[in-house]
Amino acid sequence: MTELLLFRERLKGFYGRFDIFIIPLLKFILAITAYTVINRNIGYMEKLDSPTIVLAVSLVNAVMPVNAIVLFSGIFIVIHLYRLSIICAGVILLLFTLLFLLYFHFAPRDGFAVLVTPILCTLGFPYLVPLCFGLTGTIFSAIPIACGVIVYYSINFVKSNSAVLQDMDIEALSKELKSVVDGIAGNRNMRVMVIALGLSCVVVYLIHKLSVKYSWTIAVILGAITELVIMLWGILHYDLEISTTGLFFGCLLSLVLALLIQFFILSVDYTRTEYLQFQDDEYYYYVKAVPKLSVSIPEKRVKKISGDEEEREVPVARKSQAAIRDEKEGPPVRKSPASTRTEKDSAVVRKSPAATKSEKDSAAVRRTPASTRTEKESGTVKREPSPAKQDKKT
Amino acid sequence: MVDEERLFLMTRMASFEENEGKKTIPICEFFRSDYVGFHMLLSAVYITVAYVLVTAVYLFCGMESFLSNFYRTDFISFGKELLRKYVIVLGVYVLIAFLVYSYRYTMAKKSTRTYQKALKRLSNMYDKKTK
């Protein structure tokens, strides 16, 4: 357990130092996975089903917000389906439009759930999604998860009926539209999956909010049990074509992954290095705030054995990570304005040495006199505490 | 000479502005009634468009039976039924929008309370310095 905690702290430190590279890389991987899954399943447009296009779009998405990946994925799907059948493209476009109008303007951040759910459904363990989003999101996160399931089953329907849909007669438009809508909406697998994942997300959210010990772990376990029970009920009641063995293993794997994710990612405050700049009447300030680590390296004991001398142990002095960093980079400027410190301040600073600290920020500060101003400095945000800002409402 | 106390205050404020403040500060620049009212209006527009789309698809799917019974259809009662459903859907959705955005405004206000206090303290520091 200690090794796991140590590894988690090192992961936290690694993320804190290299987040500027890690986040774009993760977005790139997510984008390339999403587009590859879409092209593998409904790659009817040959031009889009090309590694060059996928790579180029993924590289662009790496530097954009996550919702850009959701938008581009929607565009990819609609274009592929347009190649197959204009009616299918229209129905899917209508579905995406309704999702946007009814929900995404409320919670644009939850677009990520709509992207991840179909990907994990394709990979075979959709049960992981509500366990994670129930811990990180709100009670309404069940809605984008349900939307993701609907998108997955819609694409699945199109994929399995592509031969029939391709030969649709545009003159019998209303009949064909009705058959597509009924085919998507009437899918019992989809209905049971929506209920299972939605209810599981709600259960996980409600239980993890309780102030009991291990509430997160209990929430994840109960969420997995909820999914399993509802899916089993669906299989028995509606005679669904879902393998019970696959269901059990899928739920078990999702539970294990959710517990790992919860331990390594969700229960840790991953503070990042921040680069801030501001100015006052006299100086321009460029501040780099580096999060401190609370882990100390395990003590090393060196044994020197020689033929003449006796064995002796020379313990190496214990050092903290911050002390090692100070040796390399020099001690940061620190002051403790005790009169202004509050419990809620996120950047509390201490006078005591770094070896005895816990979790605070240290700031390395450089200042530039106003007389040596450059073009870069002229673009900094000016912090003027003018009374006008406080009287803005009047 | 750099005033370190002022420096740390400005650093914390800049950090807040870069992270949480990006969402909460623009919200707090509105009055509560303006912010909630604007988003309720926007939600009403969205639900109206969504309702029209869904009704259009529903009518299109049942186009054959609709056309075959065209001359026997009581359009006034059909229109009243559509309007009644629209009013119910609109009322429920706008109520949800009111609750969600009121909650968001309250949370944004709480979040910026410390920032506003820090802003006031910084203003006092500048006032003392000019005196």
Image: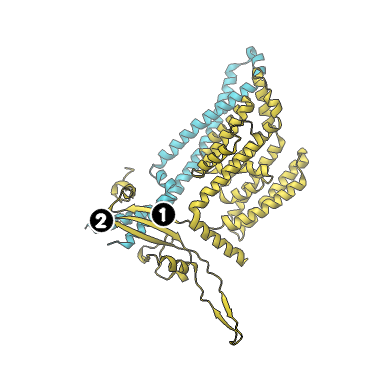
Image x and y of residue A2, in percent = 61, 67
Q: Residue at x 50, y 41 (%)?
A: A60
Subunit that carries the residue with mark 1: A
Mark 2 or 1: the one toward you: 1
- Residue B127 circle label: 2
Q: Is residue A142 visible?
A: no
- Label 1 belongs to which residue? A275
Q: Residue at x 51, y 44 (%)?
A: A62
Q: Colour of chain B?
A: cyan
Q: Colour of chain A?
A: yellow
Q: Residue at x 58, y 45 (%)?
A: A30
Q: Point out the image quarter for the N terminus of chain A.
A: bottom right
Few, some or many residues within 10 Å of mark 1 (<14, 14–19, 20+): some
User: Which residue extends farthest left?
Assistant: B131
- Residue A210 circle label: none
Q: Say what amino acid the circle numbered 2 marks.
A: Asp
Q: Is residue A147 left or right of residue A289?
A: right
Q: Is residue B80 left or right of residue A257?
A: left
Image x and y of residue A27, in percent = 54, 46
Q: Residue at x 32, y 57 (%)?
A: B121
Using the rendered view, name the quadrant where residue A103 is placed.
top right
Please name whichever residue, A276 or A229, is drawn nearer the observer in this view of the structure.
Answer: A276
In the figure, B110 relative to A143: above or below? below
Q: Say what amino acid the circle numbered 1 marks.
A: Tyr
Using the numbered discs, state the Cα–Cα distance from disc 2 to disc 1 in whole angstroms: 28 Å
* Whether labels 2 and 1 share one chain: no
User: Which residue extends farthest front?
Assistant: A307
Using the rendered view, name the quadrant where residue A97 is placed.
top right
Image x and y of residue A301, in percent = 57, 77
